[in-house]
Amino acid sequence: METIKKNKGFGNWIRTSITARMLMVGFLILVLLIPLIYIKELINERSQRQEEVVSEVGNLWGTEVLLMGPILKIPYKTYTESTTYDTETKKGITKRKTHINYAYFLPDNLNIDAHVDAIKKERGIYETSVFSSEMAIEGTFGIPDFKQKDVLPEDVVWEKATILIRSSNLKGIKNQIEMQLGDETTSFLPRYKDQQNQSYLTGFVPMHELESPFLADGALPKTKAVTFNTAITMNGSSKIRFVPVGKQTKLHMTSNWKDPSFTGNFLPEEDEEKSVTSEGFVANWNILQINRQFEQSFFGSLPDLKEFSFGTELFVPVDEYQKSERSAKYGYLVIALTFLVFFLIQTISKINIHAFQYLMIGIALLMFYTLLISISEHQNFLKAYLVASAAVIGLITLYSKSILKHRKFILLIFGSLAALYSFIFVIIQLESYALLVGSIGLFIILAIVMFASRKIDWSSGA
């Protein structure tokens, strides 16, 4: 009998003590954080799946386009001498050894006219941007300066000079590349280039080489500058960029894509010719040698210059998973504030709310995020958010009707949830002012809670 009385006393303390209810609510919040973590992992998993699909489509259609060239490659001779001594005659024998090195000369002028015809490709519920680009490239090679390395004219191997073009996307090239160089026409073939030692780098974009056959005498800038022009048609995805190898590089780009993101080391010129409209964009770049951090010629080896690239990303502006992830970050706040409202109502009105009922309300709040993710994969984020929030608010309001009984409390629950989800939606849409608006909102919520709880006798039933 004594044990039964103790159990009844403990049960009565759980039902009537404010401290006990606070501990119970706090414990349930901690328990509900576990499935919230799994929801975040679900969002990351779906986001990674989207990236895999985007990469798969890009590999089939053509990866991002990064173009560097054309570059004039000329071999030259250097010599080393070594002396050996005959042990019998004690005389020194001098041997001269010839080495072949390479010099790389960048064009004086490089003009690129690129038209990018972009479309959206869908794979299941995912979409990405792909494009077909037509590039007209022209410019001038000046007379190579070998004097800076003290290379004699007779040591320059003009007959084995070639032209190089580097590209990240050989698979996407759709025409046989031919270049008019001076009085001659030359074509290009791929050359193997080992890049395994760099493939581990984050964001590494492999560059492949195209090289011409040995140039005819009429194509060489021996005594005067030589002009060149070529055309390249290339499929790609996501980005199109160029390395400004010209002493003066000009790029004129047009596209039907309405959401460009200009990336790289250089932005387009702000002039009357640059425009972004609902039908596409027009942009112009004019880059001088003094704007970059590399010279016009290299001896020995040609460095990787893609860090100086510039161009355009065909940005897909709607990232539903990113917005869903930002929504889930406020899941702790939503659960805690909703439980706080029910706790205050329970404390003020003396209505008994069971732990199981708190748990059902918490699970309903978690269902918002699964609904949001699944619906946003088929509709835009606004529709998904409205449907998910309306469903959860309606479910909890109807459920609270059987718990709270009084109409004013039911309306309070409805109004609190509607205001809370509206507040979260506003924060998600903001970028620059998200912290400011969030801080002000939380301050207002704190003020309301302090005002509502000012008359509660916290010492009773403790």
Image (cartoon, helix red, strand yellow):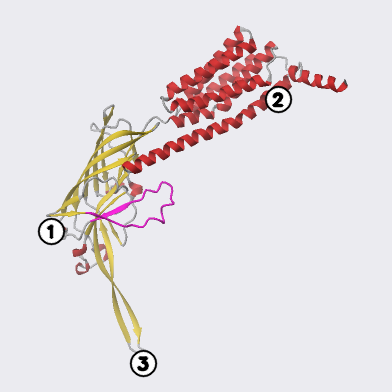
Q: Which residue is mark 3?
A: 88
Secondary structure at numbered mark 1: helix
Determine the CA span between mark 1 and mark 3: 55 Å
What label does residue 218 carry, if any? Answer: 1
Amino acid type at mark 3: Glu
| Residue 348 image offset from top left, x and y in percent | 68, 12
Q: Nearer the viewer, residue 57 or 147?
A: 57
Residue type indicated by callout 1: Gly
Question: What span is in magenta?
Answer: 188-211
Q: Is residue 220 above or below residue 448?
A: below
Type of secondary structure dominating the magenta stretch: loop
At 74% from the left edge and 18% from the top edge, which residue is drawn? 15
Q: CA distance from mark 3 to mark 2?
A: 101 Å
Residue 293 lies, in percent from the top left, at 33, 50
- Mark 3 or 2, which is nearer the eye? 2
Residue at the outermost bottom position:
88
Q: Which residue is mark 2?
A: 23
